[in-house]
Amino acid sequence: MSLSEVQIDRDQLVRNVRALRGIAEPGVAAIAVVKGNAYGHGLAEIVQALEEEVDGYQVDDIEELRALRAVSAKRTLVLGYVGKDDIDEAIRLGAELAIYDTERLPNLVEAARRHRVRPKVHLKIDALLGRQGVLPDALPPVVEVLGACEEIELASAYAHFANIEDTTDLGHAFDQLETFESCWNALRSSGWPDLGRHISATSGLMTVDKGNDLVRLGLGIYGMYPSAALARSQAELVLQPVMRWVSRLAQVKTLPARHPVGYGLTFITPRPMQIGIVPQGYADGYDRGLSNSGQVLIRGVRCSVLGRVAMNMFAVDLTYVPEAAPEDEVVLLGKQGDDRITAEEIASRLGTINYEVTTRVCPLLPKRIV
């Protein structure tokens, strides 16, 4: 029995993927985004569960590529930065790399010659995002250099939406699409008539996706919506969370009235109180911002966090669960009985987003497919 662990609902994971594929255009490849330890769900576990359900994967860097190759040989896009010294290994491992300047192209060419392969690359267009990518005005010299690199196959141009999740105004998204399509058409007329294209993650798929040959499925496959607005607009799309983060009560005891709980004396018992100690803390990804504000589920009842969340433990109020005992299951995230602690609920308490809540779950916690 693990004291604390992350449980992954494989059946629900598969249902989420199939639901998202169901709203994509026919023939669009489904690329599962498993960067950030699969948004905290466990890269190896998610990949093994989805091997027969998706057409490939996306990771961010060489370290994630290595981890992925330990469990899958499928098509993999590495869309973050890969340093010059790591390009050779990335090509050897069969990665499709992102290109957004010409500085690393000589290294790519050299690696392609050494391994006698013609690696695929994806040219990132900075279409009104202001992040990684080639600005439209800077595209012509990049095109010229790429055109001379016969050892490399330019597979796609791609971009990423900047303001499509927390808004119902898609004006900027349409401006991005116009900018991207202009660059894509320019590339096609410059020597790549069959050039692929992709711009959508989960949010794009839910709103404006069209004409792309792949979609990068991230948050949605884990059963979370990019925003409440998108959840409301996609009432027919049923996604459910797949993560359940559980621990167990390490101790149950009664404190007298006017007794402090935890560091900083931020909670003083107003009366004799039964409390429980949960052996998780901010080192495990349970945010310190949940001090005196978070809730967990014990025996199907919501129990409030008392005092400060420490590095490896925190206290909870057991007033409404007087029968609680050591080693009772504690749900920090997920369902127990008829109630559920959601990533969105935790994010609201912390002033952040659901992406961050799951991604920050400690990768050292045991993961189990259930």
Image (spheres, grey):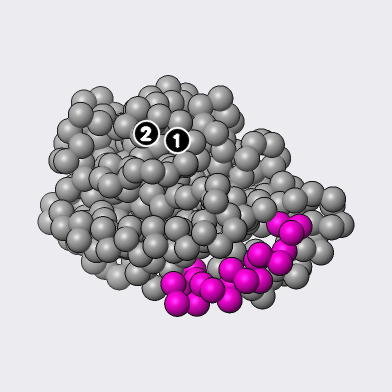
**Left or right of 267: which side holds 119?**
right
Instruction: Classify residue 259 by image quadrant.
Output: bottom left
Asked which secondary structure carries label 2, the reply is loop
Q: Residue furthest left?
A: 270
Coordinates of residue 276 in the picture (x, y in percent): 32, 43
Closer-to-camera residue (369/59): 59
Q: Amino acid at mark 2?
A: Glu
Coordinates of residue 113 in the picture (x, y in percent): 84, 57
The answer to whether mark 2 and mark 1 are in CB contact below 8 A is yes
Please state the extent of the stretch shown in magenta in the rendering. 132-152
Residue 292 numbered tag: none
Asked which secondary structure carries label 1, the reply is loop
Residue designated by label 1: 28
**Left or right of 120: which side holds 182?**
left
Residue designated by label 2: 25
Q: Residues within 10 Å of mark 1 (few under 14, many from 20)?
A: some
